[in-house]
Image (tube, rainbow, N blue to C red):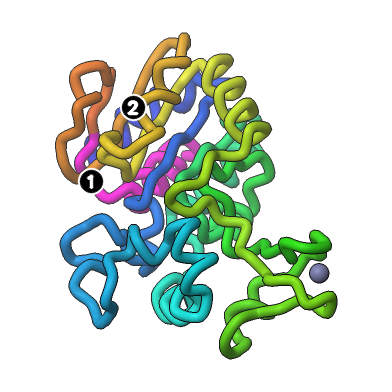
Amino acid sequence: MESAKLLSEYLKKSRRAVFFGGAGVSTESGIPDFRSTDGLYNMKYDYPPETILSHEFFFSETEEFYRFYRDKIYCPFAAPNGAHKALAALEADGKLSAVVTQNIDGLHQAAGSKTVYELHGSIKRNYCIRCGKFFDEEFVMKGDGIPRCECGGLVKPDVVLYGEGLDGATVEGAIEAIASADLLIVAGTSLTVYPAAGFLSYFRGESIVLINRDPTPFDSRADLVVRDPVGKVMSEALKIMNE
Ligand code: ZN
């Protein structure tokens, strides 16, 4: 694969690469992108996903929120794909300094990545909104109705819902990593959704590689544009590097 060969050349030179990933990184693991037309849109709910997954809806229609959340967001069989695994290996080899992701599935950590900035939080973490007690994914996903803490408080996923702000420390960490990166790999995002494009403007390094099935407004700024599936091209590039 020509694109993998080219990507491997950029990675060989890099010491502080940062990977910025969107929903397209997880689709190869079988996790639907609810913004894509074949995603969660055409489905058996009275409201669009953006409404259900909003701050207001969570507190006003909590039971319906959790019905959708357990039905559509929970992917217990999803496993890391070639992109997740390659990124963990690149970090272990001292080539990659961080992953910044818009995904909430925890697959980067499952593959072994250590420095991961989850801009939209993670379904792996849940908190009681009254006492702050932590609950794992199983507690929320396998229960029925509204998950509650022993103290009576409502348990909320540590996921940034529509209408909520991003976590300040996570944003700061992501910006710092991007600002000190020598190579920026942007993958699986159309870069039209807030806040993706804003983050990329902090990059001051050498090269930008963009991996996305469809064209993005950022293509003209990239040194290399790849249309192949991100899992395939990343694992292939890693293989070439290790030859
Ligand atoms: Zn509690």
At a point 58% along the width and 15% down the height, the residue shown is 180
Q: Is residue 175 magenta?
A: no
Amino acid at the residue labelled 2: Val
Residue under label 2: 209
CB of residue at label 2: within 8 Å of ligand 1? no
Question: Residue lying farthest bottom?
Answer: 144
| Rendered location of residue 138, percent (x, y) | 65, 79
Residue 228: which numbered mark, if any? Answer: 1
Q: Nearer the viewer, residue 179 or 89?
A: 179
Q: Give the side of residue 25 with respect to residue 62, left or right.
A: left
| Rendered location of residue 8, percent (x, y) | 40, 31
At a point 57% along the width and 87% down the height, the residue shown is 145
The secondary element bearing badge 2 is classed as strand
Magenta stretch in the rendered image = 226-243
Q: Indicate whether 98 appears above or below 161.
A: above
Q: In this orientation, does residue 182 appear?
A: yes
Characterize the local packing of mark 2: few (<14), some (14-19) or many (20 or more) Cα atoms within 10 angstroms. many
